[in-house]
Image (cartoon, helix red, strand yellow):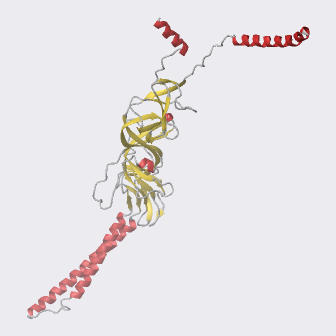
Amino acid sequence: MLSKLLKWTLPVLVVLGALAAGRYIVSQRPQAPQFEPPVVPVSIEAIRVAPVDYRVVVRSEGTVEPRTETTLIPQVSGQVVAIATAFRDGGFFSRGEVLVALDPRDYELAIASAEAQVAQAESTLEQELAQARVVADDWRMLGREAPELGLRKPQIAAARATLLSAQAQLERARVDLERTRIRAPYDGQVLEKAVDVGQFVSPGTVLARVYATDYVEIRLPLSNRQMEFIEVPERFRGERGAEAPHGPRVSLRATIGRQSWRWEGRIVRAEGAIDTRSRQLFVVAQVDDPYERGADERPPLRIGQFVEAAIDGRMLPGAFVLPRAALRDGGAVLVVDDESRLQRREVEVAWTDGEEVVVVAGLAEGEVVNVTPLAVAASGTRVSATIDGVPPVPRGRPEDDRVAAEGGAQ
């Protein structure tokens, strides 16, 4: 009986002992060291901001146009007998210079004929006046007053009218003779010549297209946003005699070949209506003496040339100027706090262009702003910031810093 009991209990005891031994061994296992992986800060470029007085520069572009363009057309007919040396495409001329001369002989003969008619009319008038004086003397000798018909007053009036008509014909002939010499209406340049020596022209024939060279104009489109920062020289009704306001300065740049050239001008006026298609307002820039030879031997500012314009805008006092890359979606920037962590900050942006962002509210002097584009940058992200080109001071791992601190305490 005893042997049978041991036969059944002994395996159970062995199993229980094995379980107890295994549990003891497990409970006595060594504890693995626990540590958190070090947080690697994100390397970024940053700047320390300071307020400045920032002048907005509004950029636009346009084409050079003449301030005055004229089509020369003769008022009389005739054959072209001479042209000026400057009367060619691109030639410069002065005001009053004879550009085209027509054959004057027909008009000189017309003057001679008109002078003869004037002389004849003057002779007729003198005869009528003399006869009137004789009749008046005869009637006076008779002691009576001469009648109007006797004094030939109707004949004298007709003779005076004939004389006035002849004098008008003479003046007309002299004017026609003067018109055979087509003169330049202003200092300018020939854009396109249409006639030459030997050609017969009549009123309505186009001789040439010319334009003034004292200054040129450039139409520059401005958006509604850009107009906020430009002091447009406005004119109002009732100010006809008033002097136009002084417009902002504009710098024009054109690339010729591999070299860029600059010209200085002023905004002189704004056009009367906003373009209905683009919703833009065109302002007009004026450049004086565009064909004057400068000290830098720059080429002339030619008609039809495309130019880029930089217009001096308003001054924004106490603004913070940041690189364009510093601005995040939604008008925010990433500020680096004292613990080297990023904090998203909403700011008020007054002006942006292709390179800069001008912030007028939301930042304080001395704050550090991230300028590195980051795909994902949540608030609280630890960073290693290179501020204004100065790299951060190297730091050891947290456990190394703790060991160093304990060693210093001993």
Q: State the residue in front, 168 or 190.
A: 190
The residue depicted at 49 percent of the width and 31 percent of the height is 343
* Residue most extreme to the top: 410
Note whether residue 119 is visible: yes
The residue depicted at 48 percent of the width and 35 percent of the height is 333
* Place of residue 336 in the rendered image (x, y in percent of width and height, measured from the top left): 47, 28
> Quadrant of residue 4 in the image?
top right
- In this view, 176 is above or below 264: below
Q: State the residue in front, 127 or 155.
A: 155
- In this view, 199 is above or below 126: above
Number of numbered markers: 0
Q: State the residue in front, 37 or 25.
A: 25
Q: State the residue in front, 133 or 171.
A: 171
Note whether residue 85 is visible: no
* Place of residue 51 in the rendered image (x, y in percent of width and height, measured from the top left): 37, 33
> Quadrant of residue 366 in the image?
top left
* Place of residue 111 in the rendered image (x, y in percent of width and height, measured from the top left): 33, 70
* Place of residue 297 in the rendered image (x, y in percent of width and height, measured from the top left): 41, 36
Residue 122 is left or right of residue 252, and the answer is left
> Quadrant of residue 351 in the image?
top left
The residue depicted at 12 percent of the width and 88 percent of the height is 137
Q: Quadrant where the N terminus lies?
A: top right
